[in-house]
Every structure is written in structure tokens, then in C-alpha cells.
Amino acid sequence: MKCPDVSDGRQSSELWLLVPAQLRQLPADLAAVLILVVATCLSVLVPVLNETPLRAPLGLAFVLFLPGYAFIAALFPESGMPPTATESGDDDERDTAEEMTGSTTGDDRGIDGIERVALSFGLSIAIVPLIGLILNFTPWGIRLIPVLLSVAGFTLIATAIATLRRRSLPADERFRVPYRQWLAAGQEELFDPETRLDGALNVLLVASILLAVGAVGYAVVVPPAGEQFTELYLLTEDDENELVAAEYPTEFVRGEAQPVVVGVGNHENEQLSYTVVVQLQSVETSGNETIVRERTELDRLSSPPIVDNETWQTTHNIVPTRTGERLRVQYLLYTEPPPAEPTRENAHRSVHLWINVTES
């Protein structure tokens, strides 16, 4: 008979001993908080992971639950009893409540599991905006990375405090999540119901929960497509080297360049490359109609592939090739190769400047 190979088990035990004792003794719920915080940071910061669907559910838990849960764990390290159980003199009800909440002493100083969950959501909704408000008065501002690291730092600090406070209590007074009891109770309800009707209702309940979770997850991971559009705009630099939509150049000398910044914003729910055709036009206005009498192509600008909700900007030097009053510099935007004769009518978007050009 072949003896069982225990080398793998010994190796696993040796590797486990390499983990610091503080981490090995960490309560299961607080260890889960740390794992979720690290997983969320990786899903946002690592280039490959931040494109996966995991980012959305991890981000929701990270913002709406984890900070509040860690804070509540630090405030209430002891186990708690449901109010109905602590007020009742029935020993059987008290024992059942202690088993479901992890309390073995009957001490009602803490809060029970339902209260923890409710307060975790409520406090998270209060804590995260407060962190954002503080960041707003710092040089980092309210941006993704500062908010991510600040919320993660707060959660980790609260988790460390919660761990220290639990360890300061007697073992039978510490809060713990009774997941083994919950799992056993769930298995008994699903696989050994008292009646067939109870079994059918349990199956229906599980199916309803799975359907609801699936629907919410799909709505988060695959949000409905919003309005599709593309932005095309012109900017200039002011005296403080900031881009503004004002003070456009209007007086030109033929052959001399003056710069403007051309911006394209993609909100088409897909990655696109754009082409901008720049024309110098002589126009005539008749009533409400503007007629182009002469057009000269000055330049063509090609953007790199722009992903959805991103913006591309480039500096373009306007160099007029002829003189005249009230000439129009028109920028025609195309999502596909421009036609043989680009016009405002066949362009996807267009913007223009009115300029005067002299010989010298």
C-alpha cells in the first residue's frame, strides 16, 4: 500500500509560517476587508486588470461598504446581541441569538450583525464624501488616484485599529462572523427542509436572489449607452499660459502664422480616429444664408485613436494664403476619410473663426 505523501502538506505549513503572526491571527472578516482593498487597488492601477469587469463590483464595495465596515469594527470590537434576544428571558432564544451573532457571553454592549451591515453602508456614504472634501483643499484635488489611495488608507488604518481592539478583549467577547453556522443553517434549509413546500420556497428564494444579483451586476458592468456625440472646439493661451475659449486671433498678415489649439472629445461609446480639414474661405452673406465663393485648404490634422470619453488636443498654426476682409477659417471634422470636396454640409462637426488678412 502506497503511503500518503505528506511533503506537500508540510511545505504548505512551512509557507504559512512565513506569513507574519499578526496576519495569520487576523480575524476572517477583517482579512476579507484587506483582501478586497488590495484587489480594488490592483483592479484600478494595473493596466491589464483595469479593463476587466471586476473593476465595477470591487469599486462599489470599496466605496459603499468597506470604509464603513472597518470604522464600525474599530468602534465596536465586541460581539452584540439582537434586542429581542437580550430583552427576553427565554434561555433557548438567547442561545440561538448567541450562535447566530457569534456572542457567547450575552453581553449587549456591542451591535449585532444586521446593525453592522446597515451602519457600514450608511457610514461609508458619509466617510467617502468627507475624504473627497478634504482632498479638495489639497494640491492633489478630487481625482481617481488620490481618492483611491485616501479611502484605502483610511480603511487600512481603521482595520488595524479594529484588530488591536479585538485582541484586547477576552476571546469569548470578541465579535466574529459566524459563517460556519450560517453555512450549516443554509445547507439544512436547502437540502433537508421540513416540508416540500419549504423546499420549493427555498429554491425559489435562492433563484430570486441569484437573478437579482445577476441583473444588478449586469447593469453595473454593462451600463446603458448614453448620448453619442463628438466635441470640436478651439482654444487659445492667455497671459498665464492657460487654455481659454476667448481672445482668438483676428488680425493676420498673409504668410505669417498665429496658433490656436484644436480639441476633439470622443463621446461616441467607441474608439475613433478623426481627421480635421482646415479651410480658408471667402464667403458672402445673403439674408440668413452664407455662400462660400472661394475655398482653399490650409491643412489636415489627423488624430491618434481616441477611446471613448477621452480628449485629444493639438496646436495648429493658421497661415493665411491670401488677403481679405471677413475671411472664414473653418475646421471640418470627419470620423471617416474626408470626401473629395469637404464642406460644412458633409462634415461631422465644424467650427470657424472670422479673420482679416492684410499684405503687411
Image (tube, helix red, strand yellow):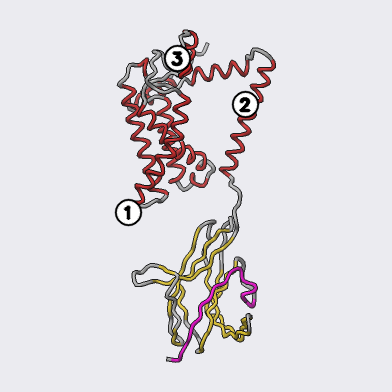
Foreground pick, 215 / 123: 123
Q: Residue at x 37, y 32 (%)?
A: 71
| Mark 2 touches mark 1? (CB < 8 Å) | no
Q: Where's residue 336, x and y in %?
A: 62, 67
Q: Give the residue pinned by disc 1.
A: 139
Read off the residue under disc 2.
206
* Residue span colored magenta: 340-359
Q: Residues within 10 Å of mark 2 (few under 14, many from 20)?
A: few
Q: CA distance from mark 3 to mark 1?
A: 53 Å
Magenta stretch: includes residue 357 = yes
Label placed on residue 87: 3
Residue 18 sits above or below residue 219 on the image: above
The residue type indicated by label 3 comes to: Glu
Q: Residue at x 63, y 83 (%)?
A: 287
Residue 105, located in which quarter of the rendered image? top left
Which mark is nearer the camera, 3 or 1? Answer: 3
Report helix, strand or loop for mark 2: helix
Q: Are marks 2 and 3 in contact (CB under 8 Å)?
A: no
